[in-house]
Image (spheres, grey):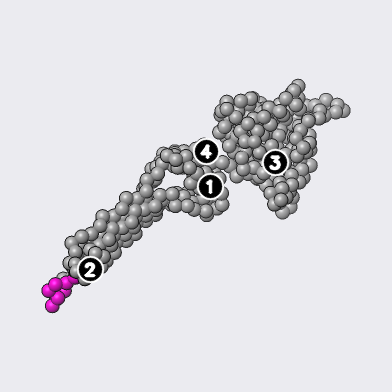
Amino acid sequence: MFIDHVEITVWGGRGGNGCISFRHEKYVPKGGPDGGDGGNGGDVVLVADENINTLLGFRHRKQFRAERGAHGQGANKHGKRGQDVRILVPLGTVVKDIASDRVVTDLVAHGQQVVVARGGEGGRGNARFATATHQAPRKAEKGGEGQELRLSLELKILADVGLVGLPNSGKSTLLACLSSAKPKIADYPFTTLQPELGVVRLGEFRQCVLADIPGLILGAHQGKGLGIQFLQHIERTRVLLFLLDITRAELQRDYEILCDELARFKADLLERPSLVVLNKVDLWPAGRRYPRIQARANALHHAISAVNGAGTKELRHLIAHQLDVAKTEKKS
């Protein structure tokens, strides 16, 4: 099961209490204060892990509390620091503080980590309060409370190419054709109900990650057909691949619907290099010219059959070219 949004509560560990104690040594009738400090509470740490691709692990556990620090002891023994809680999340996880709606962090690299709830400080023991005029203090501090936060974890897939199209345009078939991914394929709309990823070989020493985004419909930017949940996964892609069903009568309108939904969701999406790919040419009458789409200036055109593989070799070269364009534009 693919889960891309959860809410969790985290607590940093409470700090240990400081100790009130006095030395009791032979031949030292009036020993001074020797109460140790309490240990700091543990932190709650989020860690990005490339081996995880969903937030499914949070389905049954949504509360995380770090260990409290140990209390101080006599003989100036300080309490042990509480253990941290390390929470593994997928690459592409955006973390928000629900109370303030503030983005805490965006975890995009393997091993990247961030402390989201710090543990409380340990209380000071009475040895800390001794002065020249007050040599036997009977005072110590309690440990501080750890931070408590309610967090929203939202997964936005990291992929090089975003595959977008209307329902039943053949996206899942193309993903299976270009990669080793095995998405669910059937001849009816909304077969794909969650994003699918596939690794596509572009050459002997080159590959990219292709994301099949569930079919968009008119009004997707407003949430129709779970559109917003799907569109968020396109945000990080560097190249867009518009897949159109060549057998449909209004190809230009289909393309414009996709562009409009993307633009309404995030205006700069259409500024990225793109490919307009006509699919299902195996169903097109032999010898008949393919229709031409009036596309954005950054788009390249191509025709394929995801069923029999016609044109897919050339498509790999075009994907590689547009990724190079995206890389160049990023540097400029």
Kindly tell me whether residue 235 is visible in this rendering: yes
Judge the density around disc 2: few (<14), some (14-19), many (≥20) Cα neighbours within 10 Å: few
* Eye-nearest disc, 2 or 4: 2
Label 4 neighbour load within 10 Å: few <14, some 14-19, many 20+: many
Instruction: For marks 2 and 4, give the CA distance.
Output: 57 Å
Q: Which mark is residue 131?
A: 2
Q: Which residues are magenta?
A: 25-33
In this view, the mark in front (4 or 1): 1
Left or right, 259 with respect to 47, comes to right
Dot 1 lies on which element?
A: strand
Q: Nearer the viewer, mark 2 or mark 1?
A: 2
Q: Position of residue 190 (x, y in %)?
A: 61, 27
Q: Which residue is mark 3?
A: 272
What residue lies at 61% left-to-right and 33% top-to-bottom? 265
To which residue does mark 4 refer?
A: 4
Residue 31 inside the magenta-drawn segment: yes
Marks 3,4: beta carbons within 8 A: no
Amino acid on which disc 1 is placed = Asp
Question: Which residue is disc 1 drawn over?
Answer: 106
Q: Residue furthest front?
A: 133
Instruction: Give the residue type at disc 2.
Output: Thr
* Label 3 secondary element: loop
> Between 261 and 198, which is closer to the camera in this rendering?
261
Estimate the spatial distance between the alpha carbons at disc 3 and disc 2, rounded to whole Å: 68 Å
Q: Secondary structure at mark 2?
A: loop
Sequence-wise, the earlier of marks 2 and 1 is 1
Give the farthest residue toward the top: 249
Of circles 3 and 2, the one toward us is 2
